[in-house]
Image: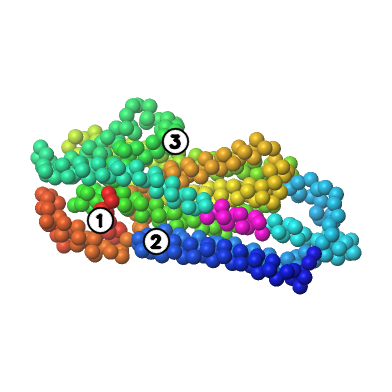
Amino acid sequence: MASLEHTPTWVVATVCLIIVSISLTAERFLHYLGKYLEHKEQKALFSALQRLKEELMLLGFISFVLSLSQGFIVNICIPETATNFMLPCKRDNHSAEEEGAKICKKKGDVPLLSLEALHQLHIFIFVLGLVHVVFCATTILLGRAKMRRWKHWEKEIHREIEKKLQQPNIKGKPLSFVLHRNHQGEFVRDHTQGFWMKLAVVSWITAFLKQFHDSVSKSDYEALRSAFVLKHYPKIPDYNFHKYMMRALEHEFKRVVGISWYLWLFVIFFLLLNINGWHTYFWLAFLPLFLLLIVGAKLEHIITRLAQEAVSSLSNETEEVPTIKPSKDHFWFHNPGLVLHLIHFILFQNSFEIGFFFWVLVSEGFGSCMMERKPYAISRLVIGVIIQVVCSYITLPLYAIVTHMGGEFKLHGFASDVHESVHGWITQRKKHGGGDHHVTADDEETPEGNTPPVTEDSSL
């Protein structure tokens, strides 16, 4: 093997030019993407990008440590008997000609790790980082695509409000009564109609199936929006709840982007148990799918519970609006953060599994024993794609609206232009008038210390 001393300079310069060009291009792309997010005041996405860059730097540092210590690693000798068990594939008899193998052979031992194995580890780290970045981008894109449908509903609600403003009092009842009664009443009827819906088993089965079809229906969105506005901004019926939910999604995305220490422990644990005959890779594919179905069913069931708890208030005709009260008690162990941790694990484990698939494909080929049989390998790849789409397009937006509609979970990054937004809204209302929409300076303070109102953007 020729060293740099006997390698043509044009070869060394060309390879360095290509590597540096690719690295600088990637770095500049991330830099300008960050500038764009800052310009658009997407603070949550910018924070997520910074965290993603930190994870990429960590992966690069791991690769650097492997490269720096490979001379030391290949010269570590262990007894050959220690390498005869816990193999991912059956070993074929072959003799290694590496320098480290020759040194260990003189001692009657074998190297702890060969140069070829170290090279494959480098590829694994690169593929894992690349797939993680792609999946993170897919997560936020699919989540935002899901919420675009909610934007049309928000427009319809705003148009309905504009029409009702022409009749501030309908049959002696205020506008807030009419709007919230209509929106929440339809929601309660959809989720509680029929005696069979009172059965816990039936409600759970219905919630499980609903996540695949119309996970957040129009009546769900209107009712949850109505409950949020009635509790926190009763004097602002045309509050832009859709924009609030977009910020909520970005806030949760920031929390599921990184690779936490316990996720790295999971990677190490999987690599340890990837033993020939155990089919660990095959069975592992069903873990995120199982968790995803359970989490989605739980979130849908929470919506059903909200409707069931509100149905008693509808039985009294003198009641102004149904009482939809979001609560932490509906979540496992009264902790909504546990659901987010599960979503985080699902997204990472799925990206890790897909990354592992492409790593084996690049380093060993499709015929590798770690791929197992082709039908199994293809089915795992299909399951991985399905998990990514369902979790990003359905589960994460569903989690955002179920948790944040109560207002207990504060979003960061709303306070930059609050003063201007509130005064702009007040000025606009004073110009147009508007019955029971009269706002005083006291209304600038947000109730219960929650996030301030987000004014309607021009695109809505």
Q: Position of residue 196 (x, y in %)?
A: 38, 27
Expressed as whole percent of the image width and height from the top left, the position of residue 351 reads: 56, 49
- The residue identified by callout 3 is 212
Image check: 370 left or right of 196?
right
Helix, strand or loop at label 3? It is loop
Tag 3 and tag 1, C-beta contact below 8 Å: no
Please name the residue shown 66% across and 47% down the image.
361
Asked which quadrant contains residue 42, the reply is: bottom left
Q: Position of residue 150 (x, y in %)?
A: 33, 43
Q: Nearer the viewer, mark 3 or mark 1?
A: 1
Neighbourhood count class around disc 2 (C-alpha, 10 Å): few under 14, some 14–19, many 20 upward: some
Instruction: Name the residue that disc number 2 marks.
Output: 37
- Which of the two discs, 3 and 1, labels the residue nearer the N terminus? 3
Q: Give amino acid for label 2.
A: Leu
> What secondary structure is marked by label 1?
loop
- Which residue extends farthest bottom? 5
Mark 1, residue position: 455
Instruction: Examine the image and state in which quarter residue 107 appears.
Output: bottom right
Q: Residue at x 76, y 49 (%)?
A: 87
Residue bounds of the magenta highlight: 122-133
Mark toward the start of the polypeptide (1 vs 2) = 2
CA separation in Å, label 1 and label 2: 19 Å
Three-letter residue code for mark 1: Thr
User: How many numbered marks appear?
Assistant: 3
Please check the rendered image and state whether residue 128 is part of the magenta-colored stretch, yes or no.
yes
In-front residue for pair 249/40? 40
* Left or right, 212 with reference to 95: left
The numbered mark at residue 58 is none
Residue nearer the viewer, 194 or 410: 410
Residue at x-position 24% and y-position 51%: 239
Say left or right for 68 vs 327.
right
